[in-house]
Image (cartoon, grey):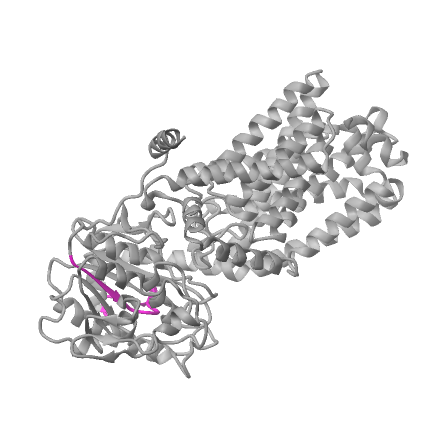
Amino acid sequence: MRQTLAALALVLSVLWPTAAQAAAPAGGRVALIGVPGLQWSDLSPESTPNLWRLAGQSAVGSLSVRAVGRVTCPYDGWLTVSAGVRSAVGYACGLPPEPVPGTAGAVIPDYAYLHRVARQKNAGTLGEAVHAAGECTSAVGPGAALALADRTGKVDRYAPSPARIGPGALTECRVIAVDVDDLIRPYVADGRLPAVEESLTPPQRAAALRRADAGAGAVLAALPQDTTVLLAGLADHGSVPHLRATMMRAADVSGRFLGAASTHREDVSILPDITATMLAVTGIPTPATVVGVPWQAGGSRTGGTEAARTALVNADVAGQTIRNVGGIFFTTVAALQVLFYLTAFLLMRRSRGLGGIRVAALALASVPVSTYLVNLLPWHHSAAPVLALVGGIAGVTLLLSAVALAGPWRHDPLGPLAVVTGVTGAVLAGDLLTGTTLQFNSVMGYTAVVGARYSGLGNIPFALFATSVLLLTTAIAHRLADRGRRTAGVAVVAVLGCSAMIMGGWPGVGSDFGGVIAFVPGIAVTALLIAGRRVSVVKLGAFCVAGGVIVMAIAYLDYLRPPGSQSHLGRFVGQVFTGEAMEVIGRKLGAMLGTLLSPNLMPIVIAAVAFLVYALLRPGAASAGVLPAAFGHSPALRAGLIGTLVSGVVGMLVNDSGAAVLSMALALGVPLTLSVGVKVLRDGAGRYGDAGQEPASSSLVSRSS
């Protein structure tokens, strides 16, 4: 068995690209210069000449400083570097504590608090690893001492500030950290970051930047020339998260972007990557609990430092725009969905306005994929990015709706459904295979500013991907069944569904843990119903267990790869072995339960489910028989919608996005189903022309069994 797994791991190492190590050779000296609060928009040749010069000599990128909370204070940022995992001290979030100097080094007072009370059991991981390798640590400033302290809170060499670095002080140890806190210190009041986005005036921030630049310049002048320099703006400065600046000066990396395999982005990294990078540069073994991977120089940048700065500033603008628009966007989507069901209910009861309902249904179903396609346009370069984004989404939505309603497929009740689901599925599949540039910085995707996910298949995209694949395959199965090839239709659902499921869960492609668990029962239920089989509670439970087994098998194979090459799937298996998995599961469970009270998500779920239930129980009174007409025309469609609901419910329970998964599955699946029923009724399609007068059971049960 072990030999089989080893062989599989060897095969997977070929299929999955291995993460590159830090650009600098192992065995060297490394110095981390932390400038909490530093953004790329702060830098210029005039105001920050030392930092600007360093940027020209370095690979440069953006740092997602997300630790545990919505914003990351300097204390949490430095503590995360110390632990190698996202960490938080758990009380007043401000500057790190002042160390107590000793003969040469220093000790952080009451350091045991972090382990005993704050439950930060990984605090001191970096310092312990350095000491275990027989090396010493040299820290300048409180944050640096916190980052390099071992589990007793001790650092070997210490200076209170860059201005008090003695001659040769940075040559004694190969692991160095410096806290340049001149920029962040004016923001902290009463031990906390301010509750506003920007508490300093532009002249005040400019003055703080000049002091920080001078401090960084003093450090750079004191470092030996062969030192690999890492610079990171490793904390937020107010109530709004931003992307922060990163630089790495080492051999042969200047003129390139700086990213990491942890994000699968060539210009974005995360805080725990700093820990892994420092250890990799010095050749010190990385502890298994460190979740970061070494920084790596990515693609070459063009146009010099100014062009790179502009690109990285635009990346923060895009992330901020998505973050700011997200709440309003989902509120609007929820309002439109509720309004649609209410209007459809009132009109259908009177058998009026069916054509308008069909157009509205297809337009609503076209919105989700439009949020991804709009990223083909440079909307974040606009002087008014919010207007450009919203206008782009509206334009793509109208275009796709028109295509769905205008082509030769419009005469087939399932034709427009196939167009919308086909485009949605193809866009998301193509995005997964090309690095997820469309989901990234999308209102229905994710952003590095928020820091929940950086690549792969997000939870909302999973709901849309699963729904579009299931409905598209059932449309194909319907055509095959019309030709007497129902078995071939079942095979289409199984093959295309499983292919999409593997793509969504495969490490380095979709890397979606919960999506696999939810997709498997959705595919199985759909296939069984199309085949005319019944689905029991026991079978449904078995399908869910099968999904869990499949995803854990994928995760374990990922775990067999080298740590620097693993995705979060493999790292989760490692957390199972170290006993940290329950903490992760508990945190995700809490997040899932929190979504059940979301005013943006639950209205969609409630309105869609209420409409479905009432329309099925009272078809003539509630919806002019639209749903029975749709299911009578295509029993396969009924199977696909039930499979979608199964995937949505299971996905809601196993993902931290919770209600977002089910709400988006319903937001896509139910309007498309109604559009089919409206077309059938309007055309008086054969024996379904009077479906509005039939009892629900006559067309819902008998045709699927």
Return the x and y of residue 638 as percentages of the image width and height. Answer: 73, 33
Residue 537 visible: yes
The location of residue 348, given as percent across then percent down, is 84, 44
Instruction: Single out the residue that lies furthest toward the front.
Output: 1
Residue shown at 40%/66% (left/top)? 120
Q: Nearer the viewer, residue 655 or 426?
A: 655
Q: Nearer the viewer, residue 474 or 410?
A: 474
Say if 558 sits above or below 87 in the image. above
Count numbered badges in the picture.
Answer: 0
Front residue of this view, candidates 370 and 457: 457
Residue at image coords 55%, 52%: 391
Residue at 32 percent across and 55 percent down: it is 273
What secondary structure prevails in the magenta region? loop
Q: Which residue appears at 64% of the width and 53% of the height?
A: 333
Query: Taking 387 as reference, is 160 left or right?
Result: left
Q: Position of residue 431 (x, y in %)?
A: 47, 39
Residue 45 lies in magenta, yes or no? yes
- Residue 172 falls within the magenta-colored stretch: no
Is 264 positioned to the left or the right of 401 in the image?
Answer: left
Which quarter of the rendered picture does the C terminus lie within? top right
Q: Split into 4 quadrants, where in the image is the N terminus?
A: top left
**Which residues are the magenta region?**
29-48
Which residue is situated farthest in the left direction here? 167
Q: Is residue 294 above or below residue 199?
A: above
Can residue 364 be seen here? The reply is no
Tell me the quarter of the picture where residue 678 sits: top right
Q: Is residue 174 above or below residue 47?
A: above
Name the outermost residue toward the top.
Answer: 484
Q: Position of residue 485 (x, y in %)?
A: 68, 17
Q: Quadrant of residue 111?
A: bottom left
